[in-house]
Amino acid sequence: MALYVYETTDPAQPVRRFEIQQSMKDDPLKVHPETGEPIRRVISGGYGYMSRYNAPRHADMQRNMQGGGGHSCGTGCGCG
């Protein structure tokens, strides 16, 4: 089950955002399940969570920047 953000779309009312848990296989909801208001799913970029366990090490970043491209990914990634 995934947690999705939805917002109301009635132009006569202020926009309200809320979360609904549903299966990834389910289609996006069109109306609020409790109030019947028209809604749409909000697509966002996410939080980009990074912990100390999956962060690149400083030495690796320095080596990549010196070795090519001038960016932390190294050469050949296409982000530079």
Image (cartoon, rainbow, N blue to C red):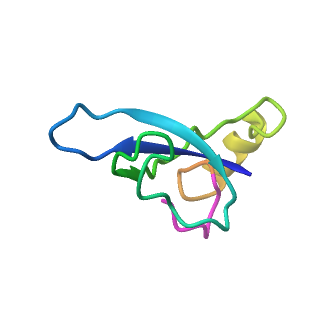
- Coordinates of residue 33 in the picture (x, y in percent): 51, 47
Position of 5 with respect to 39 (left or right) is right
Return the residue nearer the eye: 4 or 30: 30
- Coordinates of residue 34 in the picture (x, y in percent): 49, 40
- Coordinates of residue 5 in the picture (x, y in percent): 50, 43
14 w.r.t. 74: above or below: above
- Coordinates of residue 49 in the picture (x, y in percent): 66, 36
Q: Residue furthest right?
A: 53
Position of 5 with respect to 51 (left or right) is left
Q: Residue at x 80, y 40 (%)?
A: 54
Q: Residue furthest left?
A: 12
Return the residue nearer the eye: 80 or 17: 17
Q: Residue furthest front?
A: 35
Q: Find residue 27 and report its image quarter.
A: bottom right
6 w.r.t. 75: above or below: above
Residue 76 inside the magenta-drawn segment:
yes
Return the residue nearer the eye: 60 or 22: 22
Residue 26 inside the magenta-drawn segment:
no
Main secondary structure found in the magenta portion: loop
79 w.r.t. 34: above or below: below
Q: Find residue 30 and report its image quarter.
A: bottom left
Q: Residue at x 67, y 62 (%)?
A: 24
Q: Residue at x 35, y 32 (%)?
A: 16
Q: Find residue 60 and report its image quarter.
A: top right
Total number of numbered discs in the rendering: 0
Q: Residue at x 65, y 58 (%)?
A: 74
Magenta segment boundaries in residue numbering: 73-80
